[in-house]
Structures are given as C-alpha cells and as structure tokens.
Amino acid sequence: MRVEIVSRKFITPSSSTPPHLRSCEISALDQLLPPVYVGLTYFYPADENIQGAKHSERGKQLEESLSKILNLYYPVAGRYDEEKLLIDCNDKGVEYLEAEVSGRLSQILNGELQPEQLNQFLPYPVASPTSPLVAVQVSTFECGGLAVGLRVSHKICDLATLTSFVNGWATTSRVGIAEVPRPSFALPSLFPTRETTQILKATPVKNGARVVTRTFVFSRSAVANLQVIARTRDDDLEGGKGQPSRVQVVTAIVWRALIKVAKLKHGYLRPSALIHGVEMRKRSALPLPPNCFGNMLMVTMARFEADESKMGLPDLVIPVRQAIRDAVSDCRNAISYDDLLLGAAGSFSEWNEEASKGEIDVYTFTSWCGFPIYEVDFGWGKPAWVSSPHKPVPLVNLLDTIDGGVEVWMTAEEKNMILFQQDPEIISLTDSRLKNNV
C-alpha cells in the first residue's frame, strides 16, 4: 500500500486573532512535557452516498470547518516560543496535507498491514520555532474510505485537549460551530511558569536497538474474566469495590508478561517499576474551568520486588491500584494549585531519577481509555477504527476498542517483542487487528 502526498498547505483561522489574544502563555504543567508530537488516526469507511465529485466536497468541508474551529482554539494555529514560554498566536496556521492511497481501507481493517506502516497516514512535523503545533493529514483510499491523521505538540496539550479539539472540529463540520463547547485558557493563570521545572525525558533505547510496534487486543469478555480473577479485597477511590478497572487489569497482565520476558533474557527474576500516566482534571477537588486547554498530567509508579510468590495477577494488580489510588488521593487532597503542581513535578522527577539509575527495569504505560476517540463524526459517521502511531521509544499505550475491549499498542525492542509474543498467556488472551510478525 502506497500513500502519496498530493497537496500541502496551511489552514488559518477564518477570522484574525484579536491583538489582545496574540500571546498565550503556557502553564507550569506544560513545562513538564517535552516538545514531542502525539497523534491519532481515524479511519472512516466509504459512504455510499458520496461518489465522484462529492469526495472533493468532503475535503472542502474538512478544510472550512477546521478554519472555523481555529477561531475558538486560536493558540493551535500559532507557534511556540520556547525562550518566552508562550504561544505566539500569529495565525500561521495548521499544516494540512492531502494524500491519495493506492489501496483499500479494508486492507487495514482486515489486518494486512503492520503497525509501523500506519505511520504513512500521519504528518510528521519536527519541533522547531517555525513548526506548526498541529498537523493534519487527510488520506483518501481507492474505495472512497478516508483516514484523518493528526499530530499535536505535547508541549501545549494532552489527550484530553486533543480529543476536545478534534471533536470540536468534527462537530463544526457536522452541525456548525455554535454547538461546540468553548475551551478555557485559564491554566497558565492557575499554574504560572517557573524558572526551573523538571522536564519529562523519554525512556532511551539501549545500544541503538531496533524497536517495533505490535498490537494486542483484549476482548470485552476477556477483560471481564480477568477482572474477576484479579479481584482484590480493597476498595479504590473511584468506587472499584475491590474490582480492578479494565485499565488496571490489562496493565497488570502486560506487566507480568514483561517481567517474564526480562527473566528469560537475564536468567533471573528482576525488580521493575511501572510508570502510568494519570489525568488530573477530574481528580482534583480544586475549582477548574470546564474544557481547559493544556496539559494536566502526572505520573505514578508501581513497583515489583522480584519475588516469585508475588507473580499472581492479583498480586500485580494491587501495586497498580495502589499507585493510581495514591495519585488520585494526592490530586484530591491538594489544597492549592501549587500543591497540585508540586505533586505533578515530583512524579516526573521520580520517573526521571529511576530511569536514569538503570538499576531496575522501567516500563512506561499510558492509557487513552475513556476518552471519546470513537465519537469523532465529521458528518459521515463515526470511525470504524482509531489507531495509535508507532513510536521511536519503548511504550505501552492502551486504547478502547469500539466494542468495549482494550487494545494494547506496544513499542519495544525487537528481541523483547519476540519473547513477549511467545508468552502463552498473551497468546491465549489476545488477538490483533494488524500483522504482528516481527
């Protein structure tokens, strides 16, 4: 399957940003994140009602609605000034690529491609003072299917903001901008930037090893069965009553397989730490404006002490639940915005410190479950599938499936991936939408 870029342009706001809004400071929480790009690709089957010339009308609708939504999300069309720690809202625009695909969408939905090949459907901006903060690629398949790929700078937003922006764009396209909830840009006033703030660093690849991405789908029934098996005697702060969440149980089962991989490689059971991202908006008791633009993330750490008697699924669920419980408790107990910031900064600092020591294995997880990624309807229906990009560093990313399961997107060193895929539990519990041969 070949994807050919046929046009490249910049989409600017349909109305100029007023002078008093031309500078948008980032927050101290934004400072914690590196200037990398995060993204998603939405795949839409062909609409039988859209034929021939109507395909170009569909493209025009996407461009016009994007231009309109940029009036509300005006910082997205600007450029980041690292020295001044602000976004210059200069209306330079969002990079917009159009591509033609020599292939059919069914080839992807039927699993004929490997995960790395899906990166063809995403734009690839490189962080620089002149780089766009958002880039979009719209790819049309021979069958009339469509892929809408987005990348957004993590320096200015997290997945909550990304999904709000994309759903706002889709709503504008489908029914008009009047129905879009207005974003708030109040976070910089609540979390002013600091002179020195710990910045998150990516887990390095050892010795330049090749990394690969593979997908593992836990069906809804498989996850439900695991939740029963992994049930613990403790409650959590979010009403779990001893039953682990879908994310917690899938995290634990994947962590256990990774621990076994490390044992096979080194010949002995090794201690490890598991890092998980925690979204703070819904967890904080402090007043926050709805739909606030920016980053509101912290991380939490669970530990395994290399004890064979603690390799059971409930045994690994407990530290995962406890770590998430502690992070949620820290958010809810923060009595000031400074407390909330210090908690987030401290969590990133602990992660960096543990990773830099190199004394134990560190596994990084992030969950995008629970976000409305399957609600993005531009006017021709919701996506048949949403994919995560292949990444250059080891990472485990959890996404919802359309039917209530959990899809694991794992990027790992190739040798580790081969061993992971041979784990009997992973083989018996998961399937894959894509080619998973290494």
Image: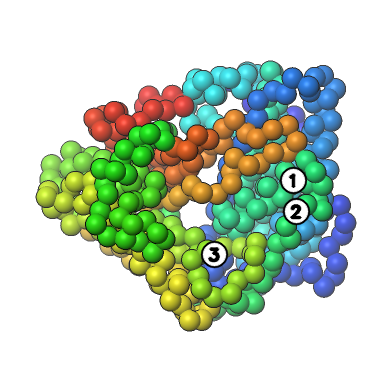
Q: Are marks 3 and 1 in contact (CB under 8 Å)?
A: no
User: The C terminus lies in which quarter of the figure?
Assistant: top left
Q: Which mark is residue 93?
A: none
Q: Please name whichever residue, 282 or 155, is drawn nearer the observer in this view of the structure.
A: 282
Q: Is residue 325 visible?
A: yes
Which numbered tag is attached to residue 180?
Answer: 2
**284 vs 421: above or below:** below
Residue occupying the point 82% across, 28% down: 56
Question: Which of the marked residues, 2 or 3, is nearer the chain's N terminus?
Answer: 2
Residue 350, picture quadrant: bottom left
Q: Is residue 201 visible?
A: no
SS type, badge 1: helix
The percent coordinates of residue 354 (x first, y second) are 31, 63
In the drawing, what numbered circle is on residue 281? 3
Write the residue at 54% across / 69% down: 29
Q: Residue 305: x percent and y percent?
A: 18, 57
Q: Residues within 10 Å of mark 2 (few under 14, many from 20)?
A: some
- What is the distance, in whole Å, between disc 2 and disc 3 at their CAs? 20 Å
Position of 242 relative to 424 (above/below): below
Rendered view: 131 above or below 402: below
Whether the residues at callouts 2 and 1 have beta carbons within 8 Å, the answer is yes
Q: Earlier in the sequence, mark 3 or mark 1?
A: 1
Q: For mark 1, what is the residue? A: 171
